[in-house]
Image: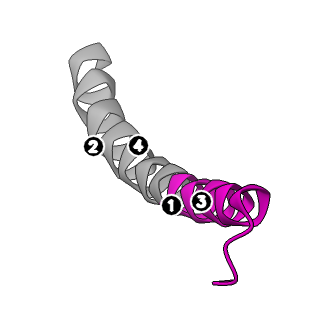
Amino acid sequence: MGRKKEEKKPKFESLLCGRVKLLVNSACRHEVRRYRNECFFSAGNPEK
């Protein structure tokens, strides 16, 4: 029974990790975009 629990756990963890990775990736993309915009503003670039 102990082994079955250990086998079930990784599946749930990988699913959770995949979801977290998606959130982190989207957050990173948003941060990069915001950082890039701030760079444009600081450089005086008219492009928003």
Q: Marks 3 and 2: which is nearer the front?
A: 3
Query: Relative to the observer, which residue lies in front, 46 or 39?
Result: 46
Residue at point 77% right, 56% down?
42
Query: Relative to the observer, which residue lies in front, 24 or 40?
Result: 40
User: Rounded to the nearest whole Å, what is the CA distance between mark 4 and mark 2?
Assistant: 10 Å
* Residue annotated with mark 2: 11
Cβ–Cβ below 8 Å for labels 1 and 3?
Answer: no
Q: Marks 1 and 4: which is nearer the front?
A: 1
Secondary structure at badge 3 equals: helix
Query: Relative to the observer, which residue lies in front, 5 or 39?
Result: 39
Please, what is the three-letter code of the amino acid marked with disc 2? Lys
* Residue annotated with mark 3: 36
Q: Which mark is residue 17?
A: 4
Please, what is the three-letter code of the amino acid marked with disc 4? Cys
Quarter location, residue 25? bottom left
- Asked if residue 31 is positioned above or below residue 17 in the image, the reply reads below
Q: In the rendered structure, does residue 31 fall within the stretch colored magenta?
A: yes
Secondary structure at badge 1 equals: helix
Q: Marks 4 and 2: which is nearer the front?
A: 4
Please, what is the three-letter code of the amino acid marked with disc 3? Arg
Secondary structure at badge 2 equals: helix
Q: Main secondary structure of the magenta part?
A: helix
Quadrant of the rendering where the C terminus is positioned: bottom right
